[in-house]
Image: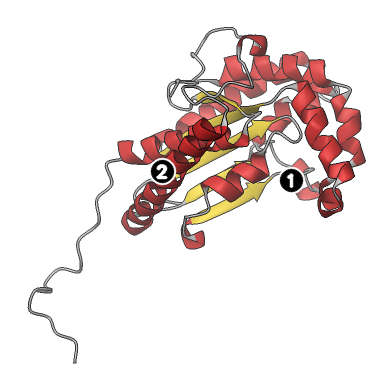
Amino acid sequence: MKNYQVKPGKKLSLAQFDPDDTGDFDSSGQGKEKAKAATAKLIGTLSELQERLYANRNRALLIVLQGMDTSGKDGTIKSVMSGVNPQGCKVVTFKTPSAEELEHDFLWRVHQKAPAKGQIGIFNRSHYEDVLITRVHGLISGKTVKQRFGQICEFEELLTESGTTVLKFFLHISKDEQKKRLQERVSNPEKHWKFNHADLEERKLWENYIEAFETMLAATCTGAAPWYIVPANHKWYRNLVIARHIVDALRDMKLRTPPGPAGINFDTLKIE
């Protein structure tokens, strides 16, 4: 499978990344089924590794999901994290800041939601909204955007130095694919609840968002907290790519099942 990691310090153009890419898996039925089988195996491994993470409680994992509307953030969580224990995993969505949150710096509310040791935290949208939607809608200046890029990098460096591995995924879909998914929400009564008329207004700003994402990805990809541009037109391949990177990150922690309490001989202990 290809490595979709952004190179730190390099300018990038999202036009160079194919949202239809499926790596070594052809998009026919056979390739798709092979990818799904590989993903299922990874999800099983993820379940085992998460249990060790939870048992050790000396490391944490933060997964950041960003992308255009309909890019598949919810679907990724539902599919890739389907095998994890809910006790050790928490999903957070950052909506419009409350009055109290606005009285603090923009990272104040985010730091409170960072995962504790032993936990997997998932940000479905994140602190990056404060350099995306605010920039596109002209709510902050270019100077403030640059300042926030630096502050975000320092924040993520603090997390990594404190034992939290940070993985950031940009779910890359095409404008045509977004149109298809929005239309499905309109046409399918079972998906009407997902439809938000504001998404149509945001779609008109597609190019502005692309530019904002390109600048953000280049400015905030670091060795400590890398960005991955995940081809997301095909949901089954998106799930495979993300599951692989999460499993690799947990394996890199070299987690072992912790021993039982000292002084107990488990070989001779019998429960009456």
Asked whether 60 or 202 is in front, the reply is: 202
Label 1: few (<14), some or many (≥20) within 10 Å? some
Circle 2 Cα neighbour tier, 10 Å, few/some/many (<14 / 14–19 / ≥20): many
Residue 11 in sight? yes
Q: Estimate the x, y position of residue 107 in percent, counting from the top left.
A: 64, 37
Q: Nearer the viewer, residue 253 or 29?
A: 29
Quarter of the image where the N terminus is located: top left
Q: Residue at x 64, y 44 (%)?
A: 75
Q: What's the amino acid at mark 1? A: Glu
Of the 4 image quadrants, the one containing the C terminus is: bottom left
Residue 70 appears left or right of 36 = right
Q: Callout 1: helix, strand or loop? A: helix
175 to the left or right of 106: right
Inspect this view and state whether residue 167 appears.
no
Q: Amino acid at mark 2?
A: Leu
Decide if residue 44 is on the left or right side of residue 202: left
> Mark 2 or mark 1, which is nearer to you?
2
Q: Secondary structure at mark 2?
A: helix
In the image, is residue 100 above or below residue 66? below
Residue 15 image offset from top left, x and y in percent: 67, 10
Q: Which residue is mark 1?
A: 101
Q: Earlier in the sequence, mark 2 or mark 1?
A: 2
Q: Nearer the viewer, residue 41 or 11?
A: 41
Determine which quarter of the picture holds residue 95: top right
- The dot on residue 42 is 2
Q: Position of residue 161 (x, y in %)?
A: 39, 34
Q: Is residue 37 left or right of residue 208?
A: left
- Is 220 placed above or below 34 here? above
- Residue 251 horizontal/vertical position (percent): 32, 39
Q: Which mark is residue 151?
A: none
